[in-house]
Amino acid sequence: EVRLVESGGGAVQVGGILRLSCATSGFPFAEYVVGWFRKAPGQQREVVACLAIGDGETFYSNFAKGRFTISSDKATNTVFLEMTNLKSNDAAVYYCAADGRIPTAEGMALIGQGWIDYWGLGTQVTVSS
């Protein structure tokens, strides 16, 4: 059974830092692409960053470049999203997703989200001024 469990969300002030974790199990971690997506109230879910675990290829949305870093720990099958200099419009529910059919991180970012196989339940990030 594939499981994706997000953690690390919470309340932070503008300019603060959070590190999200996505603990995964049930699939060959190194063969998958894992991504972070977010959904703010009243908005569509959007891609934040994706990582091809095997070769380390990454994709970042423009708003994430320079502020967010996606990484993984192959020993624990965990994917992280470190978010720095948080802004009020970064507040959202952050979701982890994984798929073994998509060959690249950019591919996960471009494909319709309905095609992505596995999703976590999300973790809430609140940013206050």
Image (cartoon, grey):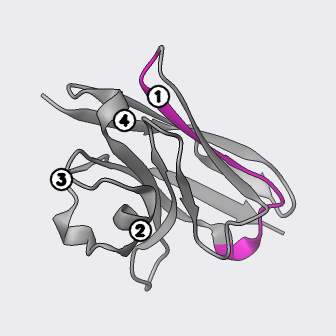
The numbered mark, 2 or 3, whose residue comes first in the sequence reads: 2
Please name which of the two marks, 4 or 2, marks the residue nearer to the observer.
Answer: 2
Q: Residue at x 35, y 62 (%)?
A: 108
- Tag of residue 5: 4
Mark pair 3, 4: CA separation = 15 Å
Task: Find disc 2 in the rendering and name its residue.
Answer: 109
Q: Quadrant of residue 24?
A: top left
Q: Residue at x 83, y 64 (%)?
A: 14
Question: 43 or 60: nearer the eye?
Answer: 60
Does residue 11 sit above or below 25 in this rendering?
below
Quadrant placement of the N terminus: top left
Q: Is residue 107 left or right of residue 114?
A: right
| Identity, as a three-letter code, of the amino acid under mark 4 | Val
Task: Find disc 1 in the rendering and name its residue.
Answer: 78
The numbered mark, 1 or 4, whose residue comes first in the sequence reads: 4
Residue 118 in picture, x, y percent from top left: 22, 48
Element on which disc 4 rests: strand
- Tag of residue 117: 3
| Identity, as a three-letter code, of the amino acid under mark 1 | Thr
